[in-house]
Amino acid sequence: MKQRTPLWLFDLDNTLHNASHAIFPAITHNMNMFMADLLGDGITPADAETVNAARQLYWKRYGATLMGLVRHHGVKADHFLHEAHRFEHLADMIRAERGLGRLLERLPGRKILLTNAPRQYSHEVVRHLGLHRHFAEHIPIEAMRVHGQLRPKPSVPYLLKLLARQGVYPRDCVLVEDTVSNLRAARQIGMRTVLVTAYLPADSLSQKKMYACVDVKVKSVLDLPDHVHRLCSAHF
């Protein structure tokens, strides 16, 4: 059976490292503080219920809280990303499995980091993990634009733009992610999809319908070599 050499698109948070351990809680706290001031009356910050409802609504609707704040509140993307990703000691918060570099070396084809995290933060995490040399390109959220407008994952127009720029067919591209909505968008245009479950909440794993857009499910990215033949098959 003929195999193609794929282009791999790797997410970062909760895919290549455990962001749920300490980083996501810190980001959530920073976002809540920012949004409480934004949604307040100018004197009193908004209450926690209002903030949580808005953050979750925007994340579900747009795939990123940032997009809702930009579209509905006129927030500057760079300012929000800076405030949400402020950490005193980021290196101490990072948790990841050993062997990620060897994994990326073993996988055939080019690898691109495609993350809805901002440039400075994601660069710092990737360098701390020693993975920067394994990626041909690093695409943070600031760089995901279509016609000058910010279009982060799960934007189908942006994914199509990326594939065209890379000169690859959707079937020759594999998206490795922990976020089902992003995988759904990729599968919609014919890309291969891999769901990483190690850091997902246990209750979400029982929802069978979430896997309709998933070609391969792995607990850890370290399991990917076991599925390369299937993912690269011309008759997948």
Image: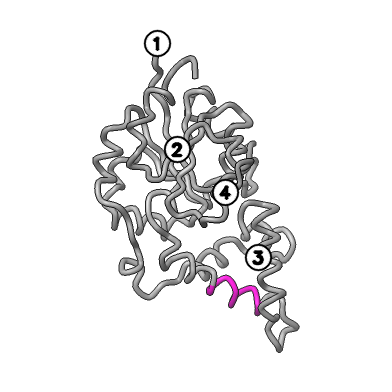
Q: Name the N-terminal-most of marks 1 and 4.
A: 1
Q: Name the N-terminal-most of marks 3 and 4.
A: 3
The answer to whether the residues at label 3 and label 2 have Cβ atoms under 8 Å apart is no
Q: Nearer the viewer, mark 3 or mark 4?
A: 4
Residue annotated with mark 2: 9
The answer to whether the residues at label 1 and label 4 have Cβ atoms under 8 Å apart is no
Magenta stretch contains residue 34: yes
> Is 55 placed above or below 17 here?
below
- Whether residue 145 appears in this view of the structure is no
How much space separates mark 3 and mark 4, taking CA atoms?
A: 24 Å
Residue type at numbered disc 2 = Leu
Residue type at numbered disc 4 = Ser
Label 3, residues with CA under 10 Å away: few <14, some 14-19, many ≥20? some
Q: Nearer the viewer, mark 1 or mark 4?
A: 4
Q: Name the N-terminal-most of marks 1 and 3.
A: 1
Q: How many numbered circles are shown? A: 4
Residue annotated with mark 3: 55
Q: Residue at x 30, y 40 (%)?
A: 134
Q: Secondary structure at mark 1?
A: loop
